[in-house]
Amino acid sequence: MPSPSPRTPTKSRSNSKRAPVFKALDADELKKDWAQNSGLTTRSTQALQSVGVLRTWNDGQVLLSRGQPTSAAWLVVSGRVRISVITSEGEEQLLRWMLPGEIAGLSSVFAQATNPADMVSHGLTQVLHIERARLMELIGRDPVVALDLLRILGLRINQLFDTLADRGIHSLEQRVWATLERIAKFNSVAVPDGVMLRVSQSDLAQAASASRQRVNQQLRHLQDQGLVRLGYRNIVLLKPNNP
C-alpha cells in the first residue's frame, strides 16, 4: 500500500485548517468523558477499600510481571503504575499509565488467568490489594459495584481496540498523533490552551512503536504546525484558534 503524501507544514495556524487525521481537539470535551469514566465511582472505591489491603511500593518496584499468576485486583490510591509489555525483540512497549482511582487485574481475577502485562510503580505508589475471594463476595452482594466493574472492563476493551488500531497506522506522523490522542484520554490535565500529557518522548516512542529519534522528528514537525507544544517530560496538544 503506498504511503500517504507528506503534508506541508503550515506557516500560520490562523490561516490553516487541520487535515482530517488532525481533527480539531476540544480539550474540555476530551477530558469530560474520560476523567469521569476511566476510574471507579466513589461508592465503588469505598466498598473496595472495606475489603482490600493497602500496600506501598517504592519507585521502580515490580507489582506484577507478565505471565505471573495472580489472585488479586489492584486499585491505585496514589502515585502511578506503568503498564507495559516486552516484545519478542526485547523492546518495551508502553501500554498506558494507571492513575489514582483506576483498577487493574480484573480480567485475570475473573478469568483466573495470569497477569497480561508488567506493572511497575512510578514514584512512591500506594495500591489497594483486593483478593479474588473477597472481591467476588463483594460483587455478589453489591450489584452496583459489579456494574461499575463491568463498565471499567468495557472501557478497557475499547482502549485495547484503540491501541491495536493505532499500531496499524502506516504513516508515523499519523501514528504519533493517534497515540498522543489516546494517551490524552487517560493521562492528561486541562491547560488554558489545550491538554497537557504527562509523558516523556521516550515513553511516547515506545507507545507508538518507533525509535525516539524518529518520534522526536515527528513531534518537531507537529510543533512547527502549531499542533503541539513540547516541554520537559510533557507534551501539550493545542486547541485550534478557530475550531
Image (tube, rainbow, N blue to C red):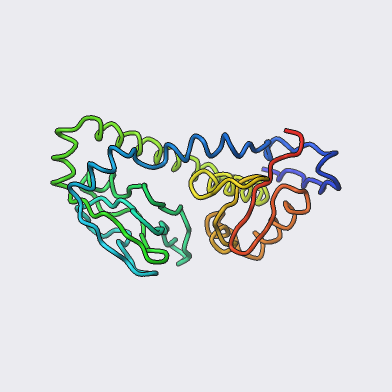
* Residue sitting nearer the eye, 107 or 238: 238
Q: Is residue 42 left or right of residue 94?
A: left
Q: Is residue 83 left or right of residue 233?
A: left
Q: Quadrant of residue 217?
A: bottom right
Residue drawn at point x = 25 percent, y = 61 percent? 55
Residue 136 place in picture, x, y as percent: 16, 41
Residue 126 place in picture, x, y as percent: 32, 60
Q: Is residue 150 left or right of residue 194?
A: left
Above or below — where is 54 with respect to 38?
below
Above or below — where is 34 with respect to 11?
above
Q: Quadrant of residue 20?
A: top right
* Residue sitting nearer the eye, 31 or 136: 31
- Considering the image in quadrants, where does the C terminus appear? top right
Q: Is residue 68 left or right of residue 102?
A: left
Residue drawn at point x = 29 percent, y = 64 percent? 56
* Residue sitting nearer the eye, 232 or 207: 232
Residue drawn at point x = 28 percent, y = 37 percent? 43
Residue 231 place in picture, x, y as percent: 65, 61
- Marks counted in the figure total 0
Residue drawn at point x = 32 percent, y = 66 percent? 57
- Considering the image in quadrants, where does the N terminus appear? top right
Residue 222 place in picture, x, y as percent: 72, 51
